[in-house]
Image: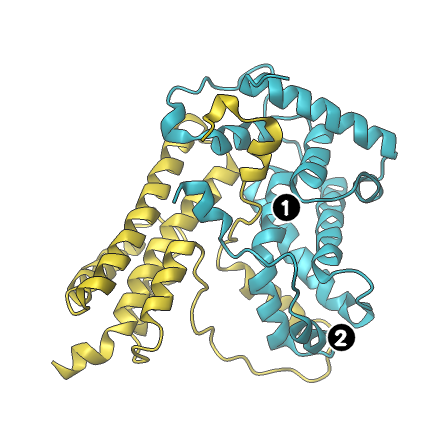
Chain colours: A yellow, B cyan
Amino acid sequence: MKDATQKSLDELLAELPRDIVPPRHLWRGISGRLNATPRRARPLVYALAAGIACACVASALTWAVLHGRATSPAAALTARAANFDEPRNPRYIAAREDLEVDFHERLKLLDPATRARIEASLEVIRRAHEDIRKALASDPASPVLEQLWESTWHDELDLYDHVVRATQPAMTRT
Amino acid sequence: MGTVQMLQGAGGMDAAAEPTELIAAAVGGDMRAFEHLYRQFSPRVYGLCLRLTGQREAAEDCTQDSFVAAWRALAGFEQRSRFSTWLHRIAVHSVLARRRGLRIDYEVPEPAAGLPDRADPAAEGPPLDLERAIARLPDGARHVLVLVGLYGFSHAEAAHALGVAEGTCKAQLHRARGLLTAALGLEN
């Protein structure tokens, strides 16, 4: 495998992610503006979004593992965390920590193989988050890095959410 | 799996297949279908806007503008081009329109004056360095590099979208590549 200095510019460009997950509040603003436009005569009733799409392969993998295990929501706790947009918000941090505690408790309910895959996914997310944090430390004004950093932050939250939701019935039975 | 490989999977779309049923439903006025299209395509649009504008707030505004404009124009979308291509053109127009209207000043230094040394290349990896270097390119060079070098526009498409001559587009790409090569210490 080539190291960084051996790669050509084209190879480096090809490695850049084309997709950057936008902040979650964007759709709310868009839908509000769409409802105000005259194009559509018949307004549609929205169901609340069932969940935020996984933003990375790791959490998508985890979701695939857990999908179908359960439908009972841990919605109240999750919504409480997801409503805070700023990762540095103390209230957001507190809600997130609550969710993380639940996540670790629910993780113990899963079979060892599933638990191992989830922990591996979490490690990937955290490592990515840390890599980007280091890059941000040397370039704090980069909006791209900042957005990537927040995306991985949210990926971790999504992973907690999926596990808490998927293990809800098992928790209820015990 | 590395950081970049993981993030490349973030909301990515299959280049070979487009969600034709969703597109058709949205063209017919189904807003829920359009929301699904938003969830599928917004990471690419946002990435494009973020790299073109260099500012998060501007990128968010442009992404919103793009999808609102797309919704309004969808009834006339005849699927002679790919939906993603059509949407990306709208995004570029949104960025340029906003820039013309608000005269955004990019707060990034010239490439030769301020690219940080890479203290820990193993930890940070080349893509993040490259991201920084791209952000520091002069506007014209960055725009062409982002459109042609990253998002697959042809020179003709990029020139048309940016309102410059195709020759200018090629020259700006050459300039961008030279600046990036020098900034990253790559061999020509």
Residue tagged 2: A39
Where is the N terminus of chain B found, in terms of image quarters? top left
Q: Chain of mark 2?
A: A
Circle 1 or circle 2, nearest the eye: 1
Quarter of the image for residue A111 reads bottom left
In front of the other: A107 or A139: A107
State the residue lying farthest toward the front. A1
Residue at 68 percent of width and 56 percent of height: B65
Mark 1 residue crowding within 10 angstroms, few (<14) / some (14–19) / many (20+)? many
Please tell me whether residue A163 is drawn above or below residue B131 in the rendered image: below
Q: Chain of mark 1?
A: B
Q: Position of residue A127 (x, y in %)?
A: 32, 42
SS for tag 1? helix
Where is the C terminus of chain B found, in terms of image quarters? top right
State the residue lying farthest toward the left. A174
Q: Amino acid at mark 1?
A: Cys
Q: Position of residue B105 (x, y in %)?
A: 66, 32
Please tell me whether residue A27 is drawn above or below residue B125 in the rendered image: below
Residue at 27 percent of width and 52 percent of height: A120
Q: Which mark is residue B49?
A: 1
In front of the other: A29 or B173: B173
Residue at 64 percent of width and 26 percent of height: B137
Residue at 31 percent of width and 55 percent of height: A92
User: Can residue B174 be seen here?
Assistant: yes
Please tell me whether residue B80 is drawn above or below residue A40 in the rendered image: above
- How far apart are labels 1 and 2 at the CA level? 25 Å
Q: Amino acid at mark 2?
A: Arg
Please tell me whether residue B97 is drawn above or below residue B28 in the rendered image: above
Q: Position of residue B50 (x, y in %)?
A: 59, 43
Q: Position of residue A143 (x, y in %)?
A: 52, 38
SS for tag 2? loop
Q: Are marks 1 and 2 on the same chain?
A: no
